[in-house]
Image (tube, coloured by chain):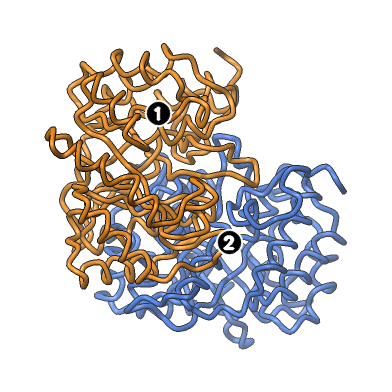
Chain colours: A orange, B blue
Amino acid sequence: MAVPAEGLPARVRIHEVGPRDGLQNEKSTVPTAVKAEFVHRLADAGLTTIEATSFVHPGWVPQLADAEELFPRVSGLEVALPVLVPNERGLDRALSLGARRVAVFASATESFAKANLNRSVDEVLAMSEPVVARAKAQGVHVRGYLSMCFGDPWEGAVPVDQVVRVCRALLDLGCDELSLGDTIGVATPGHVRALLTALNEQGVPTDALGVHFHDTYGQALANTLAALQHGVTTVDASAGGLGGCPYAKSATGNLATEDLVWMLRGLGIDTGVDLGRLVATSEWMAGRLGRPSPSRTVRALGTTTQSHKEQ
Amino acid sequence: MAVPAEGLPARVRIHEVGPRDGLQNEKSTVPTAVKAEFVHRLADAGLTTIEATSFVHPGWVPQLADAEELFPRVSGLEVALPVLVPNERGLDRALSLGARRVAVFASATESFAKANLNRSVDEVLAMSEPVVARAKAQGVHVRGYLSMCFGDPWEGAVPVDQVVRVCRALLDLGCDELSLGDTIGVATPGHVRALLTALNEQGVPTDALGVHFHDTYGQALANTLAALQHGVTTVDASAGGLGGCPYAKSATGNLATEDLVWMLRGLGIDTGVDLGRLVATSEWMAGRLGRPSPSRTVRALGTTTQSHKEQ
C-alpha cells in the first residue's frame, strides 16, 4: 500500500552504482560477461542511470581493469551510463568508446585526499579541472563525487563550510551535478539537513545535488528520507547493497537499491523500477559472488536466501 | 558530532525488548544466568526500560519458561522492568514476584489473532480485559502491544481505521501506553505518519504511543525518524537486533538498539545510553548465541566481528 507523505518529491532518480562502486569494492573480480549481464539486467529492471565502470589505472582498481571490454557491451542500452574518470587519460579512454556521461571525484578532507590520491584537496580539484573542461566542451555530462562530506576516519566530523567550499569549486569547474558522499556512513538526519541547507544558502540549488549514503551504521535510509524531505531527487544506491563484505568490519555498506525502492514505493514515489526483477538480479549476482546479499529486502523477498552456492 | 534537526523531541525513551522479544525468537534457549547478566548489563549501559521476560505458558514459548527463576534475579535493578502477561494466570505469576509493569497484547487483524491465539480480535481484547483491570487496580502500569498495525501476511495492507479501533479499545480497557507494532516490517514513513495522525484525530494522544518497527525490509530507522517527527518519544528496540536469525527468510528483524542510539545521538537527542557499553553487551551476547549481531553499528564498532566462537 502506497501512503504518500507531505513534502516529498513525486519522482526520484536512482543513480545505480552497483557495477562500479559496488564491484570495485568486492574482493573477487567478476568476469566481464557477468558484469555486462548485470548492467543489462539492471536496465531491464527499470533503472535509468547505471554507473557502468571506471576508467582508472588498472593497477589502482584491478576489479575494473576490463572497462574497455565492458563498456562496448553495454553502451547500446537506452539508459544513462556514466563512467568514473579520475584524470585526462581516463577521460580519453572513456570518450574514445563514446561515453556521454563521466564522473570525477574530490575529497572534502585533506586527510582522505592525501590517503586516497596523495594530493591536497586543491590539487585534486586542479587534476579534475581539465577533465571537466574537456568533457563539457564535448557536451558530455559531468558528475562530481565528493567523499567524506560528513565524517572522516582521521579528522572526525567534517565542518559543513569545508564541504560547501569544495562543492562550490566543483560546480565552478563545470560539474553538472554533485554526489554528496557519506563515505564512512556516520551521518545522521540532522547533519544531512544542515549540509543541504548550507549549500542552498551558498547558492547551490538542491536539484544539482545527489546523496550517496553508506549503511555502515544502518543510517542510510533515514538519511535518505531527510534528504528527500529537503527536496533532493537524486539518490545513489547499489543493487543488493554490493560493495564490501557486510560481515567484515571494513564494510563499505552502500545503501541497497532494493531497500531504497521499498521505501520509495511505499511512499508512492515513482522510480520506474520493477522490484521483483531487481531482487532477482541481486540474487543472481549474490550467487556469482558466493555470498548472500546484505540487502534486507533482497533477503526478505528472495527465493534463494538459504543457499548461495549455485553458480 | 551532534546536529539536531528541527521538530524532533529533546529526549527519547528506549523500550528495550531484547531479553523478551529478542530471546523468545531465538532458536537456542539461553541459560537463566546469561539472561540475568544480559539484563544487568543493559541496565548498566543506561537503558531505563527493559522488558525482562514473558509469563506465558512455558509450552508456548519454551525459550522464556524460566521467567520465575529470572525475574527475582533482576527485579532489584533501578529500572522499569515490564513483563509480558497474556492472561490472568500470567498476571498472577508476575504479580506474585512483585512486577510493577506488565504488557498485554492484541492484534489489529483477524488473521493474526486467529493464527497466533486462535481467537477473534474482540476475543483477544476480552481476554485482556480482566488482566488490565486487575493490574490497574493494583497500581501496575500496563502497556498494550498491538501487532500487525501496517501489514499482515494474510490480509496485506491493514486499514488505518481498523488499527485505530483496536487502539481505542485497548486504551478503554485501561492501558497506559500502546506499542504500535509493524510485525512483518513492511511499513514506510508515510504510512507511519498517516496512522499516528489518524490516532490523534480519534483522541489518542501521541504521548500514549510507542512504535515498534522491524527491519525486515530495512525500513525501521526511517520509520522511526518519521515517528519522531510526529512527536513520538517512546521507541522499542532490541539490543544487537536480537530476534530471529538475520540470515533466514523468517527473520523477525527487530530494530537494533545500537542503530537507533547512533541516530539519536547524532541528532542530539538524549537517551542516557552509553553506546560503547551497549555494543560490548551485544557482542558478548552474540558470542553466547554463536553468531554475529545483525546490528550494523555493532559490526562497525565491535571488536570481535570476525570471530564469534568464543563462549
Q: Residues within 10 Å of mark 1 (few under 14, many from 20)?
A: many
Which residue is at the front of the view, A100 or A231? A100
| Residue type, numbered disc 1 | Pro
- What's the residue at 29%, 79% (across, down)? B203
**Is residue B147 shown above or below B9?**
above
The image shows residue A290 at horizontal and vertical percentages of 59, 22
Sequence-wise first label, 2 or 1: 1
Which disc is residue B164 wearing?
none
Which residue is at the front of the view, A35 or A153? A153
The image shows residue B228 at horizontal and vertical percentages of 39, 72
Task: Identify the residue under disc 1.
Answer: A19
- What's the residue at 20%, 56% (across, down)? A172
The image shows residue A71 at horizontal and vertical percentages of 31, 19
Relative to A196, A152 lies left or right = right
**Is residue A80 shown above or below B236?**
above
Task: Identify the residue under disc 2.
Answer: A154
The image shows residue A142 at horizontal and vertical percentages of 22, 41
